[in-house]
Amino acid sequence: MSLAPKFSGQLLPLHDSTPPKPGQTSQIPHTLELYLDYVCPFSAKQFLTFYNDVVPLIRSKYHTPGVRVIFRQQIQPWHPSSTLVHEAGAAVLQIAPGKFWEFSKVLFERQEEYFDVKVVNETRNQTYKRLAELAEETTGVEKAKVYELLRVGEEPDKDGGLNIGNKVTDDVKYMTKTNRLVGVHVTPTVLFDGWPEGSISSSWTKDQWAEWLEKNLKFETTEAGRRSNAVLSPF
């Protein structure tokens, strides 16, 4: 449930809140975590329904005491371009955290542009250039800055290393390790208050989400009730 400060942009801005510091507990009693892959069609279906239809519902009906929503980037290695697209998301997350969800929406809407057939004849850096141009075209994040974080150089590093990665490699490593600790495999996966919520499907409609929210985000009006609803994650 915790979120590293450097990835604060993965937290959907539903409230005037920031991730709690180590040792602190969020005043928002519930957390919904969406583990999604940018080139997974089922992830796209879930994200776009959630972002376009469910988020407005949460903002209007469940803004207090509220629910935190976190998008956890889940790379799926059987989609070779998955890493590249998630790196682009990580680059925007570094440069303009407030644009992360907006850019994620674009990546899901245009995910077919990064499917196997569309990238098979491109070099890695060519795909990065397209992603950087997409970021600028749709969110205004400067493409030169995005590409600078993504591009892989053609020369060994100062120690002669050849597996040099790029300037978001460490971020991607951190995300991947974090997701593995929780044991997430398939996409989409949803965690509610730190536990897998297997009932939620990628094909859910707005009405199905509304029914689930009504059932799970009921808040007691008493102080004791508020405390009982403040579920902590075991992770």
Image (cartoon, helix red, strand yellow):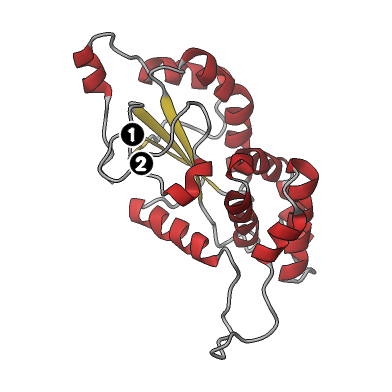
Residue 112 makes an appearance in the image:
yes
Identify which residue, 12 or 76, lies in the foreground: 12
Where is residue 216? Give x, y as percent.
37, 20
Q: Nearer the viewer, residue 72 or 139?
A: 139
Label 1: element kind: loop
Residue drawn 75% across and 44% down?
140
The quarter of the picture where the N terminus appears is top left
* Residue depicted at 77% across the width and 48% down the height: 136
Q: Is residue 92 above or below residue 220?
A: below
Q: Residue at x 55, y 35 (%)?
A: 202
Q: In this view, does 61 lie above or below 139?
A: above
Question: For residue 18, which quarter of the picture?
Answer: top left
Identified at 51% across, 46% down, the residue is: 187
| Residues under numbered marks 1 and 2 in contact, where contact means CB atoms less than 8 Å apart | yes
Of mark 1 and mark 2, the one earlier in the sequence is 2
**With 54 as the anchor, is 193 left or right in this view?**
left
Disc 1 residue type (three-letter) = Asp
Q: Quadrant of residue 160?
A: bottom right
Q: Could you tell whether 181 is left or right of 112 in the image? A: left
Q: Name the residue under label 2.
A: 1
Across and down, in percent, residue 43 comes to 58, 42
Query: What's the residue type where badge 2 is placed?
Result: Met
Residue that lies at the very extreme toward the left in this rendered image: 224
Residue at the farthest top position = 221
User: Residue 165's quadrant in the figure?
Assistant: bottom right
Tell me the mark number nearer the camera, choosing from 1 and 2: 2
Under tag 2, what secondary structure?
loop
* Image disc number at residue 193: 1
Residue 98 vs 15, above or below: the answer is below
Label ID, residue 124 = none
Within-10-Å neighbours for mark 2: few <14, some 14–19, many 20+: many
